[in-house]
Image (tube, rainbow, N blue to C red):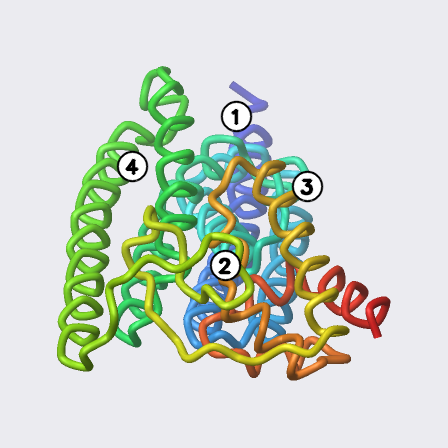
Amino acid sequence: MNNLESISEQARKDLSAKDEAREKLLPLCRDLIRYSSNAIRAVHRQEFTKADELIKTAHSMLGDAEKVVADCSELNGAGIIRDAQKELSEANITLALVTGKSIPGPKELGVDTAAYLNGLGEAVGEIRRYLLDAMRQGDLSRGEELLAVMDDVYSILVTIDFPDAITGGLRRTTDMVRGVLERTRSDLTLAMRQKALETTIEQIQQGKSKKKKNPKDNLKDDKLPEEDPEAVHQEDLELDSIEREIYEALTEWRNHKANENNLAPFIIARNSWLKQIIKLHPSSYKELNGIKGFGERRVNKYGKEIIAIINKGR
């Protein structure tokens, strides 16, 4: 019994160290979550540079949090840590999906796998919000693309069949993703059909001819393929001989990209966009952003190749 006092003293020191680590950890995790949430809001405002900066700050905070719990393994699996890692994953994945970049993995982000998967599921909800914002602005150009991404995420999550104690409640997240996916598919289908109906009514009111055009005259046909329900007829742009050669080069590039990614060509770029790009003769990403409907993601993903083709043709 003589050593009881020393044992209790050591216990107090151990618990005091853990309590001190916890008090340092909580504000770090709260700030990390706040920065990640602000990054997601920046993505929705299409402030991608700001979003990237906020994510980097949040990631540095995660490193500070890991140092705090380095000597206190009990705190490493605490709920606040997992929540912070989930928010950081969600912010990174949302930014990557919207800008068309590769999705970072859990090892790359330095987060727990379960937290990452839950963040991946939460990102689907943010993609739905981004898509709805675009739809309200009348831009359906990325609808099918983003819906396919959401479907892919659900297809992955539904195969992760492990107890909730291991996955951190991933089943609930997966059920949420399924509901979001179904609602988005319904909303997008309705919007695309409505757009197609509005286009048809507008063409009838303007007394446009319904005669079929000569298929050889493909340079003057500015309509999208029939499988594009949101096709909107735009006035043809006249191209000179040099511009026609560039147009042919761009359409060949577009078809190659479409085959590579198993997409319809109009998903990559519409005929009308290609003609506007040729007339604009852009030399930078900023100028490409001036093409209405082309979108930030397409500019980031295809801008370099498009500018190269235009410069080569000139």
Instruction: Look at 35% across and 36% down and name the residue there.
Output: 151
Residue 33, position in %: x, y? 45, 60
Q: Is residue 23 visible?
A: no
Q: Give SS at disc 1.
A: helix
Q: Which residue is mark 3?
A: 108
Which residue appears at 36% of the width and 31% of the height?
A: 168
Q: Tell which circle, 1 or 3, labels the residue nearer the N-terminal end.
A: 1
Image location of residue 310, percent across then percent down = 77, 70
Q: Along the polypeptide, which appears first: circle 1 or circle 4?
A: 1
Q: Which residue bears the numbered disc 1?
A: 4
60 left or right of 79 in image? right
Does 309 appear above or below 120? Answer: below
Q: Answer with mark 4 or mark 2, whichever residue precedes in sequence.
A: 2
Q: Residues under labels 3 and 2: Cα distance?
A: 19 Å
Amino acid at dot 2? Val
Residue pointed to by mark 2: 98
Question: Please, what secondary structure does the residue beneath circle 4 have?
Answer: helix
Above or below 287: residue 168: above
Up-down relation of residue 73 to residue 52 (above or below): above
